[in-house]
Structure formats: structure tokens, C-alpha cells
Amino acid sequence: MIDTGKYVYFNKSSRLKKSFFFKSLGINQKSYIGQIISRLHDYYFINSISLKKDYKKYYKQEYNSFRDYLDKRHNLFQNEINILKYNNAYFSEKHIAEQYKADGLLDNDYDDNVIREKIINLLNIYNEKVEDIDFYEN
């Protein structure tokens, strides 16, 4: 997962379904923590847009390649582009998802943020090229 402040980029897979989060974390979706995890999931994944479809529909004539589109349109670094897989790369605008008010739950300000640690571990398992996720990279 790549967080640029305005956008969040990630490789979408069936393992990012909400039910998979509940099962992997071993929590009941009707519990309080289940509601928090549900909001976190929605915050990052519900409003996502396929980068491939966006490129093909709006930008294919403007950019020479998909990599060029990611570099120039989304201002991503080469190592970030290498993480994103062509068919499964998605992005989400954070300001659209702010209605969920879940972004603070993953804040770096707390050394003992267990929720942040669990979500990072879960995402790292299923995005093998991602070694560390920094949700609040400056």
C-alpha cells in the first residue's frame, strides 16, 4: 500500500474482502472492534478505482505507456510503480473516504497502536513486494 497523502494505491485481491479481514484477525464483525475494522476497510478499499481502467479510458492517448501514466499523472516513484501490478492496481482518493473518520486509527503517533500493527501485517502477507507500509508518509 502506498499513501501519498491525497491518494492510497494498492494491489486489490480477493484477500482484501472485508470477510477475510474479520477471519484473519479472528474478530466478530458485530463487535466494537469489528465495526472499527469495517470502517478501516471501507476507508481504504470501498471507493477504489482501477488504475488500468482509468488509464485506458482517459489517458491512453496522452501517455506512451501505463508506467508513464503512473509516473507523470500520479507522480509515483519507480519503486512504487514496481509494486503496483497492472491488472490489480487500484487507487482511492482519501478525501472521498473521510466520511468514515477511520484514518486516525492507523496513526503513527502511538507506539502501541495494535490495530495499525495488525492491519500492516495482514496487508504485508498478501502484498509480497511491500516490505513496510507507512500510512502517513511525508
Image (tube, grey):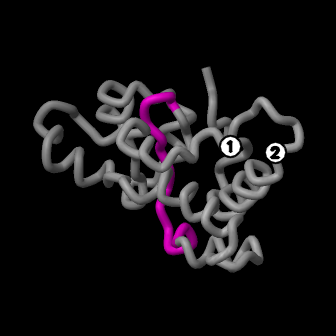
Among all residues in the image, which is located at the extreme top? 138
Residue indicated by mark 1: 106
Residue 11: say if magenta. yes
SS at circle 1:
helix
- Give x and y (percent) for residue 27: 73, 75
Density class for disc 2 (Cα within 10 Å; few <14, some 14-19, many ≥20) is: few
**Which residues fall within the magenta stretch?**
4-17
Count of picture labels: 2
- Give x and y (percent) for residue 69: 29, 34
Q: Amino acid at mark 2?
A: Asn
Q: Nearer the viewer, residue 81 or 91?
A: 91
> Is residue 101 toward the left or the right of residue 21 in the image?
left
> Is residue 77 toward the left or the right of residue 75 in the image?
right
- Disc 2 vs disc 1: Cβ atoms closer than 8 Å? yes
Residue indicated by mark 2: 113
Q: Amino acid at mark 1?
A: Leu
